[in-house]
Image (cartoon, rainbow, N blue to C red):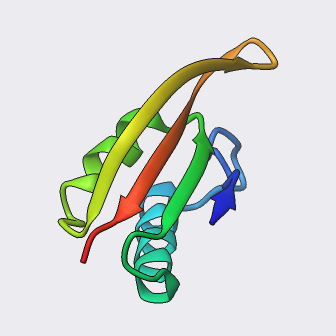
Amino acid sequence: IVTDPPWGFYKEEKNTEEFYTKMLEEFVRVLKPDGLIVILTGQKELLEKLFEKFSNLKLLNKYSVLVSGKKAGIYKIEKQQ
């Protein structure tokens, strides 16, 4: 899975944490064991906090990048058995 979800920096975003939680739940549901997820996000702290709730997701790599001058991160995640 490769995704660039909404960053939640805009007024129309209602609950970014709820959105990201549901997104990760769905990824866990559809991904096979050892499957990979790559996420580009500006919500680095939120995403890292949510990893604690998903013991079956393992962070393999994290890359700090700039997107249009804004700090962002690219996360490579593996679903564990």
Q: Give x and y (percent) for residue 24.
A: 44, 69
The residue at the point 51 percent across, 87 percent down is: 30
The residue at the point 18 percent across, 65 percent down is: 55
The residue at the point 27 percent across, 46 percent down is: 49
Query: Residue 56 lies in what quarter of the image?
Result: bottom left
Work out whether 40 lies above or below 33: above
Task: Name the residue furthest top.
Answer: 69
Residue nearest the observer in this picture, 66 or 13: 66
Residue 2 is left or right of residue 19, and the answer is right
Task: Name the residue furthest front.
Answer: 34
Work out whether 73 lies above or below 80: above
Residue nearest the observer in this picture, 12 or 18: 18
Task: Name the residue furthest right.
Answer: 68
Residue nearest the observer in this picture, 57 or 15: 57
Quadrant where the image shows the N terminus:
bottom right
Residue 13 is left or right of residue 81, and the answer is right
Q: Give x and y (percent) for residue 70.
A: 68, 18
Work out whether 3 lies above or below 29: above
Quadrant where the image shows the C terminus:
bottom left
Q: How many marks?
A: 0
Q: Give x and y (percent) for residue 69.
A: 75, 12
The residue at the point 52 percent across, 67 percent down is: 19
Q: Give x and y (percent) for residue 10.
A: 70, 42
Work out whether 8 lies above or below 35: above
Residue 3 is left or right of residue 15, and the answer is right
